[in-house]
Amino acid sequence: MSEVLIKEYRGNIVENVHRGSIAIVSSTGDTVAYLGDIEKQTYMRSASKPIQVLPTLLAGLHRRFNLTDEDVAMFNSSHWGSNHHIFVLEEIARKTGLNPDDMIMKPCSSTSASALAAKLTDRSKLHPRQGQSKLQHCCSGKHFSLMLLQRELTGKPDGYYLKDSPVQQQIINFISMLSQTPTYKIGLGIDGCGVPVFALPLRSIAMSYAKLMDPFSMSGELRDIIDYNFSCIHKYPEKINDYGTPSYYINQNPDLIMKDGSRGVICMAIKSMKLGITVKLEDGWTDEFQGLIIANILEQLKYDDTELIEKLKNCYSTKLYNDCGIEVGHSEVDFKLNIDPIFFEPAEEYIDTDGDAETDELNDEGGSDISTDDDASIQEDIPDLDKDSAFEQGSQDANSAFSKDASTYDPDADSAFADGEPYSPENDSAFDRTPDEIRAAFDRKVAEAYDKVSKATEEADDDSVIDDIISKENEKQTIEKSGISEEEQRAMRNKKSILGMNVVRPSANRTVISNPRVDPISVKPGQAAPAEQAKPVSQTETSGIAEQAKNTVRSSFQVFSPVSAEPTRHVAQDYTSRDIKLANIISQKKNND
């Protein structure tokens, strides 16, 4: 259910409230914060423009027709029809040979001459074009982009607004890829300007913006196009709406991107935090409240740009005047996000002053490579034990048996192969042994090390440390038996939370989310985009490591860009022999107790 975002006061009494929902998602798909119903499907409206322009740019049409960065910024715009907008649009028409009369929508007046513009605090740079024309429509820049690609694919711009046209098929595939939503789950409608408009859950829309700002899994060419497109927006932020608007101030910051949509839609992304944000007001009354809402979100996320936040709060007047010109009330923001506490965990906790942070992080997560695994990591898990105890010596002995890398092996430091005798060509009994005998000797050394570790564990004074590890292990086993992961439990921590509804649990084998992949450049003029077979975007595989340790889930996902047939594979976590060793110690401790 949606929550109250804005309250309007007349005197000291709340006269009106504006409800809505907010989804904040990371580029890896984690829901960082939310408010209301983030699974509710809604139309992206003009917030989809930074995605709709990508097929045109990927085809290189901006270079072919010598379009400037300012021209490209206009492709993303919901401009207000000021003189500086119309001038750029006329230049685009001249360079490309496109006719504005071929646009499907009717002529209209400039938004910069509307009642909304009158509510701006700073209207000094608004210069609306007089009269009416198709170029004054807020979506005319987008229509030029669509017509340009349609002409490239079919030989003429006609029909660019039809949902089955090649250009629209390209766009829906890009939206599907970025939002990680199969096309059959994307709702279609007709936008105010006459072209198809796409409906997705708020969470999926936020995901698409997070992916745009952090396109780590896409092909290099597509990443470059996305970065270029955003650089154009950052160079000319006044082209997206107009001077003095919330998007004007936000898009001046290269760490942020914002695009609004009609009827209560706000989308933005934060590059440094790798977050996508979507806001939807249920009553569609959003424009004059954009600044207040975004400022409140940035404050709650502890975004460090107080100057920007103050500008956003003051973009539009929050005061209510009656017909006599007397101030009789005001508007104010009133909501608190449900933020995952882990989002605010300080990074300093994970910093290794010795310069081995990356290695230690892998060891802490149990994801280090087997070839570099050693029993020293077991001692790291029990840091408070008495350093003079036999446990330390046992760990050191265990370390000598496990830490031998093929490239750095020192025979003198390890007697596993020579019964304690220093290595030399003349005195190496290992040469006289069979492989089975060598392995048996090594296993004996390992067993001796384990015996020392187990004995030290029993004799350790600080049993609370061991008990804490056992408690955590029991908790993990309980979670595994219930079939609910730690992430899922955290997602469902609040009874009112709907995050758990979005969790996909792995099947016995694999779960595949399909997504079509189409290369816009490969479509020849006069041909419709082919409906290619669905490709896997993500999959979850289940595999067992060892019976005495535990069954673990190895997660990975594959993302296909529209221009690359090769997937980028990201392995989330892998349990190694370190887990088996720790499980053995814990098991031994339980048996002794």
Image (tube, rainbow, N blue to C red):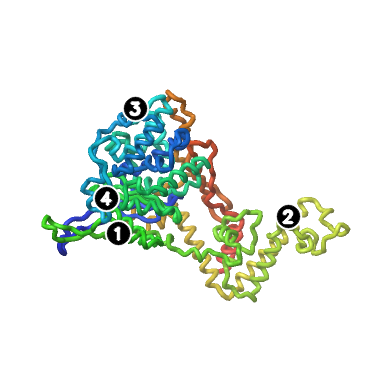
| Residue type marked 4 | Asp
Q: Name which residue lies at 65% across and 71% down.
A: 392
Report the Cα–Cα distance between label 2 and label 4. Answer: 64 Å
Q: Nearer the viewer, residue 324 or 375?
A: 324
In the drawing, does residue 404 fall left or right of residue 459? right
Q: Which mark is residue 172?
A: none
Number of residues whose C-alpha sits closer than 10 Å to that of mark 1, classed few (under 14), some (14–19) or many (20 or more): many
Q: Secondary structure at mark 4?
A: helix
- Give the Cα distance between marks 2 and 1: 61 Å
Q: Nearer the viewer, mark 2 or mark 1?
A: 1
Q: Which residue is mark 4?
A: 287
Q: Earlier in the sequence, mark 3 or mark 4?
A: 3
Q: Secondary structure at mark 1?
A: helix
Q: Work out whether mark 1 precedes mark 4 in sequence or the reverse, and give the earlier one.
A: 4
Q: Nearer the viewer, residue 433 or 186?
A: 186
Q: Earlier in the sequence, mark 2 or mark 4?
A: 4
Instruction: Give the percent coordinates (x, y) of residue 387.
Output: 63, 74
In the image, residue 506 lies at what x, y percent?
46, 46
Count of numbered tags: 4
Amino acid type indicated by mark 2: Ser
Q: Secondary structure at mark 3?
A: loop
Q: Is residue 418 left or right of residue 380?
A: right
Q: Which residue is the site of mark 1? A: 313
Q: Which residue is mark 2?
A: 407
Is 583 rendered above or below residue 239?
below
What residue lies at 68% left-to-right and 60% top-to-bottom?
A: 403
Of label 2 and label 1, which has the lower sequence position? 1
Q: CA distance from mark 3 to mark 1?
A: 42 Å
Find residue 159 and name its label: 3
Residue 56 image-quadrant placement: top left
Quadrant (top left/top right/bottom left/bottom right) for the C terminus: bottom right
Q: Is residue 366 left or right of residue 91?
A: right
